[in-house]
Amino acid sequence: VVEGGGNGGLGYHMWASVVNRDGVVCAVAFSGPDRDNQWPGSRLISAQKAYTTNAFSQPPDSIGGGPAGLFQGLSLSTANLFSAVQPGNSLFGLQFSNPINTPAAYSGAPADYGTANDPLVGETIGGVNVFGGGVALYTSDALIGGLGVSGDTSCTDHVISWKMRDGLGLDHIPNGVLPRPAGDNIIYDTQAGSPSPSGFGHPQCVPPATVEGELLPVTHPLGSPAQP
């Protein structure tokens, strides 16, 4: 996905992490030739994003309170959380919950980062990240975890995570904060000094990333909704 380009950002290499439904890290990887080709700080951010989207998304058999089960199986990407956690908004303070597991975050040999022996694997990293780059992973009948990527602008991180989920065939989200086909896509409805009309908006980063993000439901459409 990174090498293919067309992601609208800076063209940087990325870190990616996957957690299972229990929030335990299953894998950590990087896209560059070695671990030095990505921002070192983005490794933990990718794991936090994976943890966050999994922690605040619902399985397809959850009970929704909206009309016709609108919010049953609600998938929240990390991009959907940016506005909601701002002061005065409905989820303010969420970003301070579920603190990061510091011993796990900084343990092990750096030479193992991004390999099968990455010290994050098998650990619950915790942390709540509230900008683009984390998406929940759904099979045709279950929520199985989360994917987080980091290393470029947060808007491009979202684009890459969406495309990766599409490539894995794990994009069968039941519902998102937007009606299909958008689902849990990033929402660009914020203006400086004004609230997000949707309540789930994210700031724009660079114009090409905005274009790529808004086109995702067309270029990489969601899979059929998961059924319990």
Image (cartoon, rainbow, N blue to C red):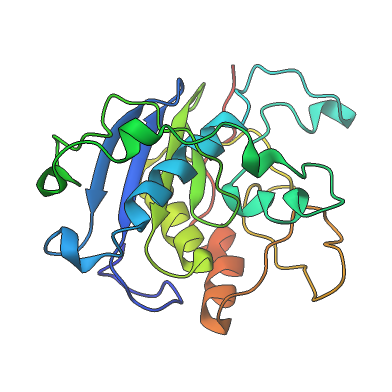
Q: Position of residue 139 (x, y in %)?
A: 46, 28
Can see residue 71? yes
Residue in the image at 75% along x and 18% along y:
63
Q: Is residue 165 left or right of residue 72?
A: left
Q: Position of residue 213 (x, y in %)?
A: 56, 67
Residue in the foreground of this view, choosing between 50 and 143? 50
* Quadrant placement of the C terminus: top right
Residue 76 vertical placement versus 139 (above, below)? below
Residue 38 vertical placement versus 11 (above, below)? above
Can see residue 172? no
Q: Quadrant of residue 62?
A: top right
Residue in the foreground of this view, choosing between 89 and 188? 89
Q: Position of residue 69 (x, y in %)?
A: 80, 26
Q: Is residue 20 left or right of residue 69?
A: left
Residue in the foreground of this view, choosing between 185 and 139? 185
* Quadrant placement of the N terminus: bottom left
Instruction: Please tell me how many numbered marks the rendered image carries.
Output: 0
Residue 34 vertical placement versus 148 (above, below)? below
Residue in the image at 58% along x and 83% along y:
207
Residue in the image at 20% along x and 67% along y:
37
Residue in the foreground of this view, choosing between 154 and 36? 36
Residue in the image at 18% along x and 37% along y:
108
> Farthest residue in the bottom direction?
207
Q: Position of residue 171 (x, y in %)?
A: 49, 41
